[in-house]
Image (cartoon, helix red, strand yellow):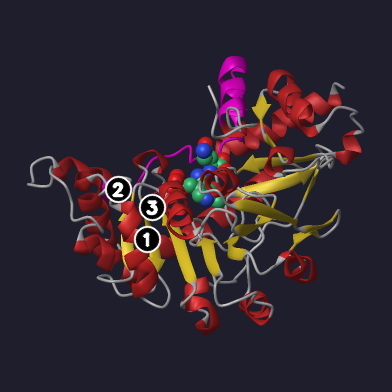
Amino acid sequence: MRSKLTGVGDSIFSEMTLAATTHGALNLAQGFPEFGPPDRLRLALAESMRLPVHQYAPMPGLLSLRSGVSNDFSGHPDPVSEVTIVPGATVGIFVAIQAFVHPGDEVVLLEPAYDSYAPAVRLAGGIPVPVPLAFDPLTGFSVDFDRLQSAFSSKTRAILVNTPHNPTGIVWSAADWQKLALIWPSDNALLLSDEVYYTMVFDGSSHVSAWSVEALRHRALVFTSFGKTFHATGWKMGAVIASDALTQEFRKVYQFVAFSAHTPSQHAFSVMFTEHPQFSSTLAAFYEKKRQILLDALHGTGCRALPCAGAYFVVVDTSDWLETDNDRSLAHRMTESAKVASLPLSPFFSSPFSSRLLRLCFAKEDATLREAGERIRMWRNTH
Ligand code: PMP
Ligand code: GLN
């Protein structure tokens, strides 16, 4: 068989979750909450079973849900012409790439990059152009705008940005967006902005969406995920926000991919947005507390946490452990011996990246985070 997608195996998320299950380890590897969705959302889904919401939703989504998304999102996109409901951000990003990237087009990605981006570009016949984030062992990762600019060419069709960023936790400020606008490659280029963690920005800062930047809005497609916002990653639903013109082109392709997303869940999310419009604004404080619990729990383990400004991951530098194996094998050994699963960072890069960095997800119960720190500490102390 001639594979269309060569060099791709099971994702690192599946690999480490399998390892966690096999060894009975705490799973701080895969990014999903250990807790479930709010009661009102669960109840609304149960209630939907008695309502006439079992057939196809309108292709762009229930209007009540699109209005909820619009109210929740800065800049309030028009629910009719600028918001589309999709079965998860992964689908939204995939469809956008199929809709806009032509064979031979280049798509600039910042690495470490989420695993679905490059395969989606390749399947469209496009060429992923990876640009590494700058890395400083003390201050962590940051965008190097000179490097970004040098990756632009006349073939650049899209730039894929993720803020807050998985796995590094960096967030784009208004000044960062302005820098991007200043070096923008051409009128032909689009901005694909993965903002699935938009509700999780810490330390008093706020999320700055590409949609709120005047100079970029008309070129941008923004992706959100209700899975992240409502602790319901398994419900697979999210929204794509873009100008009327880009939305029309996006929907043209989307109607042949899924046509529409699960109607009862759309109803439930719509109830949640309507009755609890403040819910998403509580998440930053909720997760900031968990970030602190994890950071406290890591004291005495000998690993050093890099700054985390957003999303629900902390990256730790384990160089001081002086182990000789690579991050992937270290993550496996820690899963087996300490019974704590983490995610190595190297699979987020297309070329070898040799730092000894592990990602820990803190969307877990407080007791789990404390226990994880304790287990790592004991493991290190018996080394
Ligand atoms: N983008 C990033 C950066 C993610 O971390 C995830 C996480 N799962 C997704 C997209 C996919 O979101 P969804 O589950 O809604 O497809
Ligand atoms: N986004 C999640 C993470 O980063 C995992 C998603 C998946 O398993 N595909 O861990």
The residue stretch that appears in magenta: 14-41
Mark earlier in primary sequence (3, 2): 3
| Magenta stretch holds residue 30 | yes
Q: Point out the frontmost of discs 3 and 1.
A: 1
Q: Which residue is mark 3?
A: 226
**Helix, strand or loop status at disc 2:** loop
Vertical placement of residue 104 versus 36, above or below = below
Rendered residue at 70%/35% (across/down)? 373
Numbered mark located on residue 256 in the image:
2
User: For mark 2, does the 10 Å Cα neighbourhood hold few (<14), some (14 to 19), or many (20 or more) residues?
Assistant: few
- Amino acid carrying mark 2 in the image: Phe
Mark on residue 205? none
Tell whether position 60 is magenta.
Answer: no
Closer to the N terminus: mark 3 or mark 1? Answer: 3
Query: Which residue occupies the extreme top position in the image?
Result: 22
Mark 1 sits on what residue?
250
Give 19 or 122, whichever is nearer the viewer. Answer: 122
Relative image position of residue 30 (x, y in whole percent): 57, 36
In the image, residue 276 lies at what x, y percent? 29, 62
